Image (tube, helix red, strand yellow):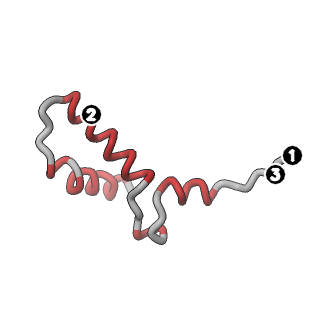
Amino acid sequence: MVERLWRSVKYEEVYLKAYSSVTDAKKQLSAYFEFYNLKRPHSSIAKMTLNEFYYDQLPQQNKVA
């Protein structure tokens, strides 16, 4: 699983950009991970985002009124 993540990071972000500094790289990688978790659909989980998949797997909590 981690190998797939790093492959995506390298081919979708790192290899496509020329970062001007370490600070710039950290900023842009942070934005990429936000995209990867919140907006990018993943084929292995029925085109859901990781965020959607995670919250769909949590047990439903009973709300007390």
Callout 2, which amino acid?
Lys
Q: Which residue is mark 3?
A: 62
Name the residue furthest front.
Answer: 65
Q: Position of residue 15 (x, y in %)?
A: 15, 51
- What amino acid type is highlighted by mark number 1? Val
- The x, y position of residue 7, in whole percent, is 26, 56
Q: Is residue 62 left or right of residue 45?
A: right
Instruction: Estimate how packed mark 2 is, as few (under 14), some (14 to 19) or many (20 or more) residues with alpha carbons within 10 Å.
Output: few
- Secondary structure at badge 1 equals loop
Q: Residues within 10 Å of mark 1 (few under 14, many from 20)?
A: few
Q: Which label is found at residue 64?
A: 1
State the image coordinates of residue 48 (x, y, percent, origin top left): 48, 64
Secondary element at image label 3 = loop
Q: Amino acid at mark 3?
A: Asn
Task: Please state, as top left, top right, bottom left or bottom right, where the C terminus lies in the image.
Answer: top right
Q: Are marks 1 and 3 in contact (CB under 8 Å)?
A: yes
Whole-number angstrom distance, CA of label 2 to CA of label 3: 40 Å
Residue 26, which numbered label? 2
Which tag, 1 or 2, sits closer to the chain's start? 2
Left or right of residue 40: residue 45:
right
Q: Quadrant of residue 27?
A: top left
Q: Residue at x 40, y 70 (%)?
A: 43
SS category of the residue bearing label 2:
helix
| Residue pictured at 28% horizontal, 41% vertical | 29
